[in-house]
Image (spheres, coloured by chain):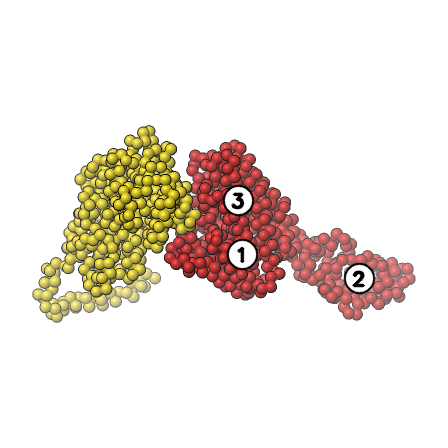
Chain colours: A red, B yellow
């Protein structure tokens, strides 16, 4: 009980730290955007049009250069993102590194400050998660606690940045933990509340959307909202595919990776001279997209396409930053486009904002894989129930269609490309991540292939094992023989023949980096005592006993069950 | 712990008291007595305050200057000006500044501060509210500048003739643009200020985002489009035009300064009401110029004049909103007519729910360009009658001097 309360208090503390970090991060981005002439207000207040043109191209380019240099110091030469957080929690690895966390946040800060078309919530979530993990490590807590404190940091970051505590809690469970254990809920909720309190006292912001209370959509409009959801899934798919596609293309470009963000920045800056809406997070664009008549239909299409391309360019070419804010803008533009078309066909214009919000949710929910969080964000930001039910209508089709066609979220797709498949749930992810090398045993009988059968029987009998592994002069694994087979040969009078003549069924072998999951799969095909472990050259390293594989499987499953279903 | 500290402190205290006694007794021996007596008798040097004159100055006299002299014995001389920084610039350059305090609009105070003409001021200078609320929480957001402290707030608001809309009255600034529900001609000031803000508010933009959106061409065009959608629109330039147009029934809604409307309602009995929703507030501040002769006394006055009680008292003479929430809540009746001043104070909680604070910094840097864009748009596209008369059309784009806003029965 005390331990649990301690965890709740730790959650609140981490929530406070993560919220302060988030507040400072957001303030720093806004300040940089004003100073570096990225934000419309900063650009408007700058009186020299010529210098403004130069700054528009130069600032993202130089920002890209800085980001490129920053990434050279990171392992994998890329900033860490919420996908890394999800991987650490889903595999129960935990232990997010501090240095990478800080450098990734810095990379996000420079990217956002210089006007790259990326999101701010990704860096915030990763920063919060890194702080949470650091807290668990400093107090020498276990992996389960580490996972919970990571979730606390994430929840606080979202709760602060959106000023939406419920969305923060649900995001941490829906996207990061992917379970709803009470043991995790209380600390996460404490963190989110602290974040919310800090946000309301430090950040003062207007509602993201404003809706006159009297307007309600007509019944037939809900059908349109569902349809917008279906189409939004395709927009989300196009968005995710473009980011990944540009990433692949970038690999083939004849530039060193550290220069790629600068090239993207230059392209972005030149395009922004023509359509400045694509610079930065695009909060102004988001607002305009909720106002009927702020954009014409063609303009909406143009800005939507360019924003999507700009985001894919920036993220694919290696700027640091999130995927959520641009998805918000793209989704809202898409919804506004639908609203404009419905209006042109004779529909009502007073419900325009409903279309914008439906489009927003339909695109963002699939991208981050979080339909509930998206709905709650709408609810908490607008306080409008009618708007939330409209958004619900559009999520009905958006999330499943996108999941079927593309994957659960962009994070999951990225992780799958890195070899971590979360589509089959967490237990598989944990077992795939658990390595065999701890289970490796040298307590086994090895025989040279030319050993006589009788002698082999004697050695095996004395060792208490029922199997022997044949290792040649070079140390390479040949096959395994059982005591029963050797006894049979001896009975048949073949006692003087070499053991290599003994019949043996072909057996799979495991690499030293094989996972428990892989070993479990092989167990289905093997009837024997142990599986041999060999390296790439075929050198015999030892064996793993079936019992230890089964034990490891049960241990991991138990730990998972305790973490996900434990009440306290 | 505490006791140990006290024990340690005790000898020091005794020593200090002893020294004090010695000094006090020795003092008369070293300082000639007549000089001490002369210093006690001679009045302290007077403070010179530069302010706007008229009814505004009379209100300040009664609510601030006279009580200050009564309390401290420091007399106050008042000098008058109509805004502008030229005189201050010269005085500071000559290191001969005749004023100790200046009553200045916040936009000018920002410019003067940037030029280094003013002493820096901090929020610790003013007193907490009577209930102990610290100044940072009690004052309006943005009340403490680097060199200026907001003491009151005046507003550009919309006034309307209730008799023009039988059975309903406008409650939201969006109603200014709703000529279906509130038919009739409108009059707006011939400048972007306030008009652009109102147009975007009417689209449902939250007030926190107004200037960010107005910083884009899209936002400006959206606002201008909404303004352009008004039929029978009259543009006014002089501050007394809106009340005249409303009085003559030429228009049914007009923008204007809240003090002017107050004057028309109270002193001339004009049947109009004020729509407070979307009011655009501007700050009036106290500043202390560089090289002032009495900086200490000036600070003392500043603390006195910004106290909750004094602010509430000032608002009983003129409809200026106190910059402290504790004072705005205390505002009572008008001295003289007994009118409930709460209905006329921009910062009273009843009126300030959706108040916009004018972004002085933004206007300071964009006024010319935005003004040009504004006038260009209406010259080319407007269906509205743009200017009242040909000679007004040639008038300057700039806003009327701030002194024009300092209102009052006879200003």
Q: Horizontal and vertical percent for residue B102?
A: 23, 55
Distance from label 2 to label 3 (Cα)? 62 Å
What residue is pinned by disc 3?
A334
Q: Counting residues from the N terminus, which is met first, the one under dot 2 or under dot 3?
A: 3
- Chain of the residue displaying label 2: A
Crowding near the residue tagged with mark 1, few <14, some 14–19, many ≥20 C-alpha atoms within 10 Å: many
Crowding near the residue tagged with mark 2, few <14, some 14–19, many ≥20 C-alpha atoms within 10 Å: many
- The residue at 58%/53% (across/down) is A243
Q: Is residue A482 left or right of residue B112?
A: right
Check whether the beta carbons of the residues at disc 1 and disc 3 lie within 8 A of each other: no
Between disc 1 and disc 2, the foreground one is 1
- Chain of the residue displaying label 1: A
Q: Nearer the viewer, residue A369 or A459?
A: A369
- The residue at 72%/53% (across/down) is A521
Q: Counting residues from the N terminus, which is met first, the one under dot 1 or under dot 2?
A: 1
Question: Most extreme residue toward the front, as rendered?
Answer: B390
Indicate whether B165 appears above or below A9. Answer: above
What residue is pinned by disc 1?
A314
Q: Horizontal and vertical percent for residue B204?
A: 41, 41
What residue is pinned by disc 2?
A479
Q: Horizontal and vertical percent for residue A48?
A: 39, 58
């Amino acid at each position: 009980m005390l331990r649990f309360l301690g965890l709740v208090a730790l959650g609140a503390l981490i929530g406070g730290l993560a919220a302060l970090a988030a507040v400072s991060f957001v303030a720093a981005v806004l300040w940089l955007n004003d100073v570096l002439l990225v934000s419309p207000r900063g650009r408007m207040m700058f009186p020299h049009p010529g210098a403004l043109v130069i700054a528009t191209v130069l600032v993202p380019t130089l920002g890209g250069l800085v980001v490129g240099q920053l990434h050279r110091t990171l392992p994998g030469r890329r900033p860490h993102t919420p996908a890394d957080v999800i991987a650490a929690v889903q595999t129960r690895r935990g232990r997010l590194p501090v240095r990478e966390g800080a450098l990734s946040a810095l990379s996000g800060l420079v990217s956002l400050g210089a006007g790259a078309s990326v999101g701010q919530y990704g860096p915030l979530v990763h920063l919060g998660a890194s702080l949470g993990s650091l807290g668990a490590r400093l107090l020498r807590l276990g992996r389960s606690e580490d996972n919970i404190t990571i979730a606390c940091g994430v929840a606080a970051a979202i709760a602060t940045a959106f000023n939406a505590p419920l969305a923060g809690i649900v995001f941490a469970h829906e996207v990061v933990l992917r379970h709803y254990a009470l043991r995790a809920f209380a600390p996460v909720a404490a963190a989110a509340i602290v974040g919310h309190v800090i946000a309301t006292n430090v950040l003062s912001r207007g509602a993201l959307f404003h809706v006159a209370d009297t307007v309600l959509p007509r019944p037939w409009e809900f059908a349109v909202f569902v349809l917008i959801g279906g189409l939004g899934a395709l927009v989300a798919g196009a968005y995710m595919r473009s980011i990944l596609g540009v990433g692949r293309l970038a690999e083939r470009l004849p530039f060193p990776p550290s220069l790629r963000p600068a090239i993207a920045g230059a392209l972005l800056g030149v395009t922004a001279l023509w359509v400045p809406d694509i610079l930065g997070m695009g909060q102004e664009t988001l607002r305009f997209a909720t106002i009927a008549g702020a954009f014409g239909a063609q303009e909406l299409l143009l800005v939507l396409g360019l924003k999507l391309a700009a985001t894919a360019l920036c993220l694919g070419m290696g700027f640091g930053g999130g995927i959520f804010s641009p998805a918000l803008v793209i989704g809202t533009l898409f919804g506004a486009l639908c609203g404009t078309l419905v209006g042109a066909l004779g529909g009502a214009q007073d419900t325009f904002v409903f279309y914008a919000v439906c489009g927003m949710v339909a695109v963002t929910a699939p991208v981050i894989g979080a339909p509930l969080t998206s709905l709650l964000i709408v609810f908490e930001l607008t306080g409008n129930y009618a708007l939330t039910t409209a958004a619900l209508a559009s999520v009905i089709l958006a999330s499943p269609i996108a999941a079927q066609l593309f994957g659960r979220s962009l994070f999951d797709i990225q992780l799958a490309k890195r070899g971590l498949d979360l589509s089959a749930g967490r237990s598989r992810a944990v077992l795939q991540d658990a390595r065999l090398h701890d289970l490796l045993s040298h307590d086994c009988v090895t025989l040279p292939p030319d050993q006589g059968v009788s002698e082999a029987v004697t050695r095996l009998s004395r060792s208490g094992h029922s199997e022997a592994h044949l290792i040649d002069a070079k140390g390479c694994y040949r096959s395994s023989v059982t005591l029963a087979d050797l006894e049979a040969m001896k009975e048949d009078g073949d006692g003087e023949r070499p053991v290599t003549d003994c019949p043996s069924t072909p057996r799979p072998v495991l690499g030293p980096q094989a996972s428990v999951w892989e070993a479990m799969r092989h167990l289905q095909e093997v009837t024997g005592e142990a599986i041999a472990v060999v390296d790439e050259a075929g050198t015999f390293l030892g064996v793993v006993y079936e019992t230890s594989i089964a034990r490891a499987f049960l241990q991991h499953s138990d730990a998972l069950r305790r973490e996900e279903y434990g009440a306290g | 712990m505490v006791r140990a500290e006290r024990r340690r402190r005790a000898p020091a205290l005794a020593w200090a008291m002893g020294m004090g006694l010695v000094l006090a007794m020795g003092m008369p021996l070293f300082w000639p007595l007549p000089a001490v007596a002369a210093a006690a008798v001679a009045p302290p040097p007077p403070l010179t305050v530069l302010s706007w004159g008229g009814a505004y100055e009379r209100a300040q006299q009664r609510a601030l200057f006279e009580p200050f002299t009564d309390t401290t014995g420091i007399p106050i001389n008042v000098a008058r000006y109509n805004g502008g920084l030229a005189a201050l610039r010269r005085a500071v350059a000559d290191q001969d500044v005749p004023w100790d305090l200046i009553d200045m609009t916040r936009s000018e105070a920002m410019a003067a501060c940037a030029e280094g003409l003013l002493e820096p001021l901090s929020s610790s200078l003013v007193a907490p509210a009577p209930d102990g609320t610290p100044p940072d929480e009690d004052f309006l957001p943005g009340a403490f500048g680097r060199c200026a402290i907001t003491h009151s707030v005046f507003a550009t608001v919309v006034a309307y003739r209730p008799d023009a809309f039988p059975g309903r009255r406008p409650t939201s600034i969006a109603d200014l643009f709703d000529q279906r529900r509130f038919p009739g001609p409108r009059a707006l000031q011939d400048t972007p200020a306030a008009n652009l803000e109102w147009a975007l508010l009417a689209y449902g933009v939250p007030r926190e985002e107004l200037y960010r959106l107005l910083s884009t061409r899209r936002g400006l065009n959206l606002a201008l489009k909404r303004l352009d959608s008004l039929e029978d629109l009259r543009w006014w330039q002089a501050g007394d035009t809106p009340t005249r147009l409303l009085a003559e029934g030429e228009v049914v809604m007009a923008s204007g300064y809240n003090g002017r409307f107050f004057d028309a309602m109270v002193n001339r009995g004009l049947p109009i009401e004020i729509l407070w929703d979307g009011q655009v507030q501007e700050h009036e501040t106290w500043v202390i110029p560089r090289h002032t002769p009495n900086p200490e006394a000036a600070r003392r006055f500043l603390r006195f004049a910004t106290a909750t009680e004094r602010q509430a008292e000032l608002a009983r003479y003129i409809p200026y909103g106190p910059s402290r929430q504790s004072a705005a809540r205390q505002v009572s009746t008008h001295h003289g007519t007994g009118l409930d001043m709460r209905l006329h104070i921009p910062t009273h909680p009843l009126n300030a729910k959706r108040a916009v604070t004018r972004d002085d910094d933004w206007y300071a840097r964009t006024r010319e360009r935005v003004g040009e864009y504004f006038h260009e748009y209406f010259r080319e596209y407007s269906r509205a009658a743009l200017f009242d008369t040909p000679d007004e059309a040639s008038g300057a784009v700039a806003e009327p001097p701030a002194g024009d806003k300092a209102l009052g029965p006879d200003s």
